[in-house]
Image (cartoon, grey):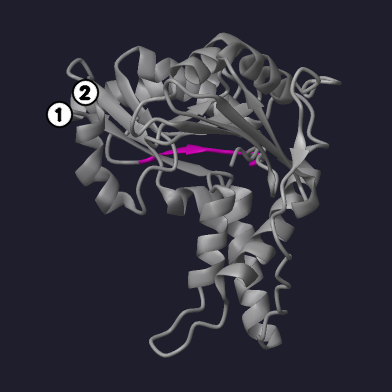
Amino acid sequence: MLEIVVKTENWERHVRVSAEELAGLVRRIGGDGDLFLVVQCIPDLPDVFAQVWHKAGGDYTVEYRDGAADRHFQAMADGPEVVIAAMTGWARQEAGWGGDLVWSLLDMGPVREVPPLDLDEGERAELETRVREVLVGGYVSRAGLAELAEEYLVTQDRRPVSREQAQALADRLWLERVAEQAEWQDETDPERLTRAFTALQETGVTARENFTCCRSCGQAEIGAEGGPDARGFVYFHTQCTDSAAAGHGLTLLYGGFDGSSETTTAIGDEVVAALEAVGLHTEWDHDPGRAITVTPLDWRRRLVG
């Protein structure tokens, strides 16, 4: 699999696609509402991307940007194969990946300077603390992190952080986290958790990570997530994620779709078995009215973007 995210004009988001799947997406574009795709690294890096635009019957416009505004290039291609080769090489970070295309520098205009934040020390600390909490949780995108930074201190009569300031703050903290995770080795506990949830999903248990904002919303919405053959569910909401990221273990909510205590207990047993199969420890007394806790837990979730 390629360590990329592919986003299309019609709002599809494809994570860690194969080279064949990327080729299929490139060949597909050209119709109304599906004219372009953007490819980003995993983890996403500020102003680093490749993209292609194509309308059926015309050439392909390929672009890539390597960070700064003076590193944004464009090339034209008359068919998809050379585009596919370039995009795949970019995704793999191969030397000379774009050598079959003729690139020209795009003039992106002057770079606008972002003014420093006009916040007192208390507000600045509060804002950065909350942004870091969500960042460590690991489910946010760069765009989502910037939106949080922009909106967090808003009151009825004051918006102290502009969109540009929020993006700059989010990108700075994002890159700090990317540098931290570059030192992580082997499989992390959140990756083990995802493996367990994937296995449960395949056996008819609807499993969702970081699902909704709270228990009330989760219980109200989880039923719509399950397929016709789903027997039960397990999930954790964003407040559970915050707690896990702070080092307090992870609370899992579960149940059977028939509402019976017997099915709920059986689903709990399946959840515990799946977690233990991937090397995670749980605390649960088989009471269907009590949540399952995953602890101890080293919460190091790799960013995607």
Decide which of 148, 73 is in the foreground and name it. 73
Which amino acid is tagged 1? Ser
Label 1 secondary element? loop
- In the displayed structure image, the side of residue 296 where residue 205 appears, left or right: left
Residue 260 circle label: 1
Label 2 secondary element? helix
**Residue 247 is at least partly visible in this image:** no
297 is within the stretch colored magenta: yes
Q: Secondary structure of the magenta portion, mostly?
A: loop
The picture quadrant where one finds residue 65 is top right
Decide which of 132, 154 is in the foreground and name it. 154
Which amino acid is tagged 2? Thr
The residue to which callout 2 is attached is 263
* Range shown magenta: 291-299
Give the residue displayed 64% in from the left and 71% down from the top.
Answer: 165
The picture quadrant where one finds residue 29 is top left
Give the residue displayed 47% in from the left and 39% down from the top.
Answer: 293
236 is within the stretch colored magenta: no
Crowd rating for badge 1 (residues with CA inside 10 Å; few <14, some 14–19, many 20+): few
Crowd rating for badge 2 (residues with CA inside 10 Å; few <14, some 14–19, many 20+): some
* Dots 1, 2 in contact, CB < 8 A: yes
Decide which of 167, 79 is in the foreground and name it. 79
Of all residues, the one furthest to the right in this rendering is 95
